[in-house]
Image (tube, grey):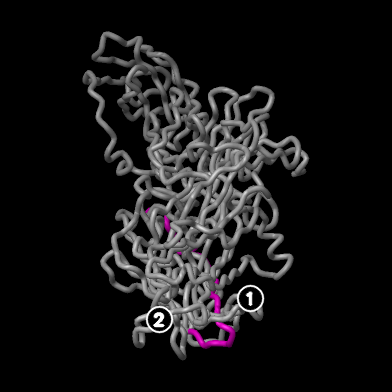
Amino acid sequence: MSYKKWIIIIVFFLVIPFVANSQFRLTEAGKSKEVNNKNTTKNISSIVLPFVEDFSNYTNIPNPNLWENSGAWVNFDYPVFPPTVGVVTFDALDSQGQLYQGANTTGFPADTLTSCKIRLDSTLLPTPTKLTPQDSIYLSFYVQPGGGIGDKWDNIGATPAKKDSLVLQFYSLSQNTWHNVWKTEGLSVDSIFAKDSTYWLFINIPIVDTIYFNSEFRFRFLNFASLANNPSYDYVGNCEHWHLDYVYLNKDRRFDDRAIRDIAFVNPARSLLKEYQAMPALQFREEDMGDSIDIKIINLSDIALSSQYNYYVFNSFGSEVASYNGGFVNIYPYIQTKNFQTSPNHANPPINFSYSLNPNQWETFDVVHIVKEGVGQDSRTSNDTIRFKQVFENYFAYDDGTAENGLGIEPVQNVPSSLAVGFNLNVPDTLTAVDIYFNSTYNDANLKPFYLSVWNSLAGKPNDSIYRSHIYLTPEIDGLNQFVRYYLDYPLVLGSEEFFVSIQAKYDDYLNIGFDRNTDASSKILGNCVGIWENTYFKGSLMIRPYFGYKALIGLQEVEKEELSFSIYPNPTNSTVNLKINNNNSHNYEIKIISILGKEVYRSAFKSQLDVSSLSNGVYILYLIDTKTHQSEQEKLIIQK
């Protein structure tokens, strides 16, 4: 495939073309924080030194014991190789996930993260002692611009523009004023790596002015963002990411005081399955297990340390079902080697077991990874454990549940476009619904009608359509990263083979579907806008999840309708079949016949007699569908010749 056939457009409240003539578009997603994430001030007394925060032991909202008035949000998914797992991210959206009021193209203040009050007048341990500038107090932190590294189609998040910035301010109690003490303008991770072979800026700020030495010292970070001129609202999303990690304020430090005796995980835990983050218990086979795990462990000190790594797997009752002991190995300082742990026992531990499942019962497992320093005292234990919940219910998921971007097909020549995702069944099953997460866009420009289809596969691409929704559907948004379930018009029996789920815009519109950048199922994603199915080269996973079995229908709202019954005769038949219905409004009904493999072989308006002589011998399902309420009844039809 030639890249000349593609257009790549990434949207951060702007549209930037990279290469001409493509069908896929990538957009920015909203921030992963709840609508109540504002004014998280907690009424506590001033904090006593040291102040340490690495954002690793909770998600979403910064710790209210340390931070006030936060518009920033804690996450594990947007940074590139952070100093430790978990960061706090700044962007252009407020705590409600909406663009800040007063947003403009020249620049506006956005997220703010303010520390609680800190005692810089004295320290209490080991004995109460007055603090002065001579106590060598420094505030250090790591900062990374968003956007990731390398090729644009591999990136996560949005790189700040040159005119955007992240600012650090100190509060003067006597002057009741915030003072700028540090600032960085927009830059890329690649530019940082080119200078120092690391992914982060390390900043260390001395506190020497006596106006700050009081019992109510505070500091805050805030970012200034900007919008591009003339945005295309269909693609408007989030923008201007900055990531902050490992904020450390203490006395008796030096200007080059960078080393911290801390061994930590860098990335969050992932699925132990080869392809999926979740899959139906019925479909699971031992060969679905992965071979090994990619683990990133870092030594933030300036000396080699010995560490021990283990993982454990617990079932839903808390019983241990598997474990791995990687033993003790040395890990060398990252600030010297610029490498994470390289020992395969810790960096690529084998998956030495297979899940034992009842195929007819849902099950969840907790996978827990732990790393510990073997000798000495690790300064932080919160970053020594990461967890993953392995789900075996009745759905497939390539994604991890968080959309860092949106992905869709750009219409070409006023032709409606389609986007498809492939899945593999190990045994026949019944598809009943599809969960989809559509990204929110400015003025709901993304909420365009679409059709839901299912296809069989030929050579890894959609081949014949075996299902298409009777009427068009409309994207719904139920909250950030919240899937909406779209029920099929009737249960669809699928064989043990690959199938595709696709959505097609009703008109020449763009549909912005959630796109997880931390898992990669790009080989299973195809787009079609000119009659040809082609793979995307954006790395990630579409947030489309097929649901199987009648359990997926639990919670479906019942629609009041007139009782419907019908009969078919003769059955079995060899040429014609008669239909009798207990409803005088037969013109409201449609007939559909599905093969046992789920392929639609006949469709028409209601007829009292059908000619089925063209169908092969076999078992079929005949559906009678109310075209007004879309409710259906079904009967088994046997054809024998």
SS for dot 2? strand
View extreme (front): residue: 174
Q: What is the x, y in percent for residue 277? A: 46, 56
Q: Is residue 298 magenta?
A: yes
> Which residue is disc 1 drawn over?
339
66 left or right of 563 in image: right
222 left or right of 127 in image: right
- Compared to residue 190, the image places residue 543 above or below, namely above
Q: What is the x, y in percent for residue 151? A: 70, 53
Give the residue type that dot 2 points to.
Lys
> Which residue is disc 2 drawn over?
130
Q: Residue at x 54, y 73 (%)?
A: 208
Give the residue type that dot 1 points to.
Asn
- Compared to residue 469, the image places residue 323 above or below, namely below
Q: Which residues are magenta?
A: 282-307
| Quadrant containing the N terminus in the rendered view | top right
204 left or right of 470 in image: right
| Quadrant containing the C terminus in the rendered view | top left
Quick one: 139 or 342, which is closer to the camera? 139
Q: Which mark is residue 415?
A: none
For residue 317, which quarter of the picture? bottom left
